[in-house]
Amino acid sequence: MAILVTGGAGYVGSHMAHALVDRGEKVVVLDDLSTGHRELVPEAAKLVQGDIADTKMVTKLITEEGINAIAHFAGSIVVSDSVSDPLTYYDNNTVKSRALIAAAVEAKIEAFLFSSTAAVYGEPGVDLLDEEQNLQPVSPYGWSKLMTEVMLRDSARAYGLKYAALRYFNVAGADPQGRTGETREHATHLIEIAAQAATGRRNRMQIFGTDYPTPDGTCLRDYIHVTDLIDAHVKALMHLLNGGDNFVANCGYGHGFSVLEVVDAIKRVSGVDFRVDLAERRPGDPPALVADNARVRDILGWEPKYDDLDTIVKHALAWEDQLVKGRVKL
Ligand code: UFG
């Protein structure tokens, strides 16, 4: 098997590249390195720096490397940026994905995996979100991903494309072996930011909103360890290549933690009591997003291995520590 991993120099994509290399698969990473880092790509993978919408180059790559599956992680992910600059998000996440899907269809790729998001649901107002909820994103980011899901659905009907779209909840943690992790210049994710506070990369952090209709007033999220998320991707790939049906499924653990609980866990696990300021709500944050994960379990037989907040936090802290000590050069 030869897999093209777009965005394979980024956070989630690099974990996929490592997991596939670990299985002995041939991996080609396509990444424009706008936010990714070549140091996160496994040595055994080939890294091509380029644009997923460069159809000529992608088609040549597919043919020359004998690619039979594509795992598409490349994209922009900061929800607030998508609100201030929607057209960039529609370009990076929708228009470029359209070009990649067209190349995949043309080349008769056998399986296409897509990184989708819980942001396609918007502000659902239910405790557990299954895939049949209304799809009403509240950000251009959510719409940009939903439009790509729609293109995949319609391409499956029209051209027989085989695909799976995985709707991620809050991805967190890092490779348990310490080979890769979340490494953004402008961190926005809670665990990433709290880990930076615990390791001294920042001297404080804020909690956005303490008056939500949740048990402790802060938002609830379903934090999934990146390694479990990648395990679902590998299983989804096998499922499709073995003739399984196309599907769209949530990826989360099915239970939520509040922002306060996460911050407490980081303080407890790190042993560092960093400064936390209570702040106004961040625009666009739904009070609670928790996955019903019955579908991904049923279809793939997926069983999480790292469903433990302290373990997620421990791995995030270990990665952050490597960054602070300069052991990973970025
Ligand atoms: N938060 C803080 N302080 C911070 C950062 C975050 O209090 O410094 C809070 C947020 O307000 C929110 C929670 O922590 O209540 C989680 O925020 P993140 O930024 O870590 O993640 P989001 O839930 O906003 O978004 C993430 C992904 C989306 C995805 C969503 C699905 O970035 O792509 O999870 O649950 F859609």
Image (cartoon, rainbow, N blue to C red):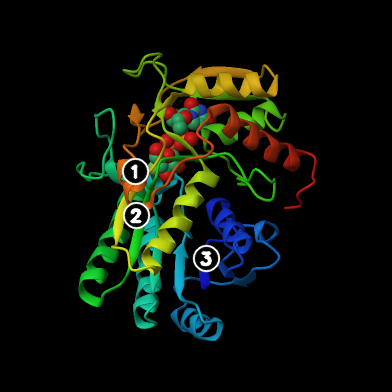
- Of all residues, the one furthest to the top in this rendering is 216
Q: Which mark is residue 145?
A: 2
Q: Secondary structure at mark 1?
A: helix
Residue 263: horizontal and vertical position, in percent?
56, 22
Asked whether the residues under the numbered discs 2 and 1 touch, taking CB atoms below 8 Å apart as contact, a structural biologist would say yes
The amino acid on which the numbered mark 3 sits, given as a three-letter code, is: Val
Q: Is mark 1 within 8 Å of ligand 1?
A: yes
**Residue placed most toward the observer, 226 or 201:** 226
Is the distance from the Cβ of mark 2 to the nearest ligand 1 atom less than 8 Å?
A: no
Camera-side residue: 264 or 175?
175
Q: Compared with residue 231, is residue 283 higher up or lower down, i.e. above or below?
A: above
Q: Is mark 3 within 8 Å of ligand 1?
A: no
What amino acid is found at the position of numbered circle 1 in the picture? Ala
Quadrant of res 93? bottom left
Residue 226 drawn at (x, y percent): 53, 45
> Which residue is label 1 attached to?
119
Residue at position x 50%, y 51% in the image: 230
Q: Nearer the viewer, mark 1 or mark 3?
A: 3
Query: Where is ligand 1, by quadrant?
Result: top left
Foreground label between 3 and 2: 3
Q: Which residue is mark 3?
A: 5
Q: Which comes before the other along the chain, label 3 or label 2?
A: 3
Q: Position of residue 313 (x, y in %)?
A: 60, 31
Query: How many discs appear?
Result: 3
Report crowding for label 1: few under 14, some 14 to 19, many 20 or more residues within 10 A (C-alpha): many
Q: CA distance from mark 2 to mark 1?
A: 8 Å
- Specify whether 207 is left or right of 95: right
- CA–CA distance in space, label 1 to label 3: 22 Å
Q: Amino acid at mark 2?
A: Lys
